[in-house]
Image (spheres, grey):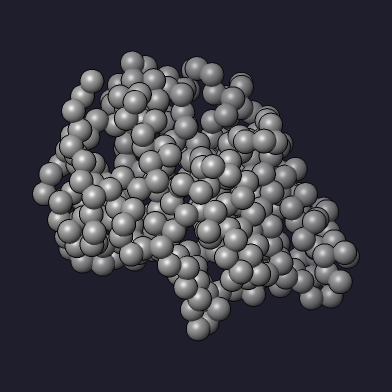
Amino acid sequence: MRPISYSRAHDVAGAIATVTADPTSDFLAGGTTEVDLLRQNVLLPRRLVDINDLPLTQIEDRPDGGVYIGAVARMSDVAEAPSVRERFPLMAEALLLGASAQLRNMATMGGNLMQGVRCGYFRDAVSPCNKRDPGSGCSAIDGFSRNFAVLGTSDSCIATNPSDVAVALTALDARIHTEGSEGRRVYDIDDFFLLPGDTPHLEHPLAHGELIVGIEVPYTPVAENSLYLKVRDRESYEFALASVAAGVTTDDGVITEVRLALGGVATKPWRARRAEEVLRGARADRDTFARAAREELASARTTPLNAFKVELAQRTMVRALETLTSPERQS
C-alpha cells in the first residue's frame, strides 16, 4: 500500500499553492473516477488536496441568458437547475444520461471534464499504453477496440473521450475558467480537449496546479430547441457507443442555425462542423441530414471491431435532427 497524504483546502489560492509546490500532488473533488485510478495504480500521487469545501458550487444566471457553473457544482444539481433545464435542455439531458443517480450526486462538473479515458488498457497498469506510459505503444489499436474512437485518432492512441456533458458543452461553445500560479485563464472548450497526436498523455493544456474554477455557457437561442441523444449497450448505465448533442432552428422549413457535437466516436468531444456547414441554409429534410452526417464521418478511421460506429453515428445524427425538426417539435 502506498502512503498518500491528505489535506482539505478552504480557499482557492491555498489549494493552488499547495498543489503547485509539490509535483507529486493532485486535486481531489468528487473522486468518483480518481479513487478508482488510485486503486488501479494508474494515478500515483503522494498528496491529495481535497477541494470540496471551496466556494465553487454556484449555478449563476448571467444577464445575457447564459449561465456560469462552479467547478465543484454536483452534476445532479446542475441537471435540475431551472435555468439549465429551460434554456439548455441538451446539457440537462447529457448530465442525466451521463451517470447513475449516486454518481451524479457526488461527481462535480470540473471533475467530469478531467475524468480521463475509459480505455481498459489505460486502466490496466501492466498493458502498454502511450497515454499512461508515453512511448510504450497502444494496445488498443490491435486489441479489443469495439468501444474506441473513429474520429480524431492517431497511431499513438484511439481512446474515446467518455464525457457526455462535455459533448453538450462543446455544442454550446462553453468556456472553461481556470486559476493557477499565472493567474486566471479562459479556454474555449474546443481548445481545452486535445487530440492525441504524438502526445496522447496530454489530454488538456493545464499546467500542474492549474485548477478549473468554473464553466461559462453563453446563451444562444438555438439551445432552446435541443436534445442529447445517447446510444449505448444497456439503458441503465453505460458509456456512449455514439451520442449527439444537437440544437436546430428553422424558418419555413429551412435551417437557420444548427449546433452539433458527437460523443462516443472521437478522442475528444467532437464538434461536427462539416455537418453544420452542410445544414445551415439547407432544407430540413432527411436527405439533407443524411448528407451532412456522411460528410462529418467521411474522415473516420476504423478498426474491424469499431467500423460499425460510422453507420451508427450517422443514423444517430439523422434521428436527432429529425426529432428536433419534426412538426410536433416545431408546433
The percent coordinates of residue 235 (x first, y second) are 70, 36
Is 145 left, or right, of 34 in this rendering? Answer: right
Which residue is located at x 70 percent, y 53 percent?
A: 292
Where residue 197 sits, quadrant-wise, is: top left
Residue at the farthest left position: 21
The percent coordinates of residue 243 (x first, y second) are 64, 45
**Does residue 126 appear in the picture of this structure?**
yes
Is 206 left, or right, of 17 in this rendering? Answer: right
**Which is more toward the observer, 241 or 33?**
33
Quadrant of the rendering where the C terminus is positioned? bottom right
Which residue is located at x 53 percent, y 60 percent?
A: 78
**Does residue 116 appear in the picture of this structure?**
no
Would you place residue 63 above or below residue 268 in this image?
below
Would you place residue 259 above or below residue 19 in this image?
below
**Which is more toward the observer, 302 or 17?**
17
The percent coordinates of residue 286 (x first, y second) are 83, 53
Which residue is located at x 69 percent, y 57 percent?
A: 227
**Which is more toward the observer, 21 or 14?**
14
Residue at the farthest bottom position: 63
Where residue 177 sits, quadrant-wise, is: bottom left
Is 169 left, or right, of 191 in this rendering? Answer: right
